[in-house]
Image (spheres, helix red, strand yellow):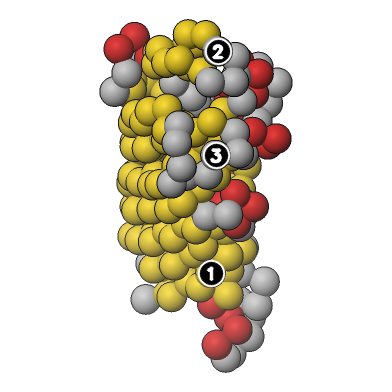
């Protein structure tokens, strides 16, 4: 059902905004700023052909220390969360040269640790993967596009994304474990990938765009 909804939204957007103006083809290489705040790294490649948008992105070593978590069960249980990788691709539609909407299937790996133990120390609690499918709305701003030198390709790409979790490798999306802090059995619910454990998040990427 969600696949159908996402595809329908893209098709509807294409019909509503269809224009006769041909858009330039581009290849973009960008790096996420938001991932740096989590001590991680993300690289993304885009291919724009006429009205179509294609992308692949891969992030590594994202960290959510316990003091960065939202109020809730994970924080109360003293968990720290590490994402060794998050990866996926996108297919979408270009409204204009600077605005596009994409359907994005993504996969994410989560590792759970007790607060303050470090990623290589015990107790390691467990790990799992999640699959998300959602939408991303992206702007591509070329502040120096009128320049006739290498500056013309410099790009800033703010974006907003809605990536709801559709499934996880956990049984019923729950991980049961013994917590050495609370000294009792606890349950961890598979997380959403966005801000404060929701499907939504904002980011800004910077990079370079090549027109052809």
The quadrant in which residue 141 appears is: bottom right
- Quadrant of the rendering where the C terminus is positioned: bottom left
Cα–Cα span, label 1 and label 2: 48 Å
Q: Residues within 10 Å of mark 3 (few under 14, many from 20)?
A: few
Is 53 located above or below residue 80 in the figure? below
Mark 1 secondary-structure assignment:
strand
Task: Please tell me which residue is depicted at 53% across the width and 69% down the height of the picture.
Answer: 207
Q: Nearer the viewer, mark 1 or mark 2?
A: 2
Who comes first in sequence, dot 1 or dot 2?
2
Please state if 212 lies on the left or on the right of 140 as rendered. Answer: left
Residue found at x 45% / y 15%? 178
Q: Within 10 angstroms of label 2, few (less than 14), some, or many (20 or more) residues? A: few
Q: Which residue is mark 1?
A: 207
Residue wearing tag 3: 117
Residue 209 appears in view: yes
Question: What x and y, as percent, mark residue 146?
Answer: 63, 80
Quarter of the image holding residue 195?
top right
Badge 1 density bin: few <14, some 14–19, many ≥20, Cα 10 Å: some
- Name which residue lies at 42% across and 75% down: 211
State how far apart marks 3 and 2 are (Cα): 16 Å
- Residue that mark 2 sits on: 183
Per the model, the C-alpha gap separating discs 3 and 1 is 36 Å
């Amino acid at each position: 059902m969600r696949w159908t909804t996402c595809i329908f939204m893209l098709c509807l957007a294409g019909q509503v905004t269809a224009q006769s103006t041909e858009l330039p083809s581009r290849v973009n290489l960008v790096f996420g700023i938001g991932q740096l705040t989590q001590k991680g790294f993300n690289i993304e490649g885009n291919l724009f052909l006429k009205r179509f948008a294609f992308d692949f992105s891969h992030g590594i070593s994202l960290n959510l220390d316990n003091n960065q978590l939202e109020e809730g069960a994970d924080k109360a249980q003293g968990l720290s969360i590490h994402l060794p990788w998050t990866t996926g691709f996108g297919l979408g539609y270009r409204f204009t040269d600077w605005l596009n909407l994409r359907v994005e299937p993504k996969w994410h790996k989560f590792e759970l640790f007790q607060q303050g133990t470090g990623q290589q120390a015990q107790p390691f609690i467990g790990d799992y993967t999640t699959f998300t499918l959602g939408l991303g709305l992206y702007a591509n701003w070329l502040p120096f596009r009128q320049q006739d030198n290498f500056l013309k390709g410099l790009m800033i790409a703010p974006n907003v994304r809605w990536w709801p979790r559709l499934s996880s490798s956990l049984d019923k999306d729950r991980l049961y474990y013994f917590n050495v802090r609370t000294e009792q059995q606890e349950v961890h619910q598979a997380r959403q990938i966005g801000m404060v454990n929701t499907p939504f998040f904002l980011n800004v990427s910077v990079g370079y765009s090549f027109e052809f």
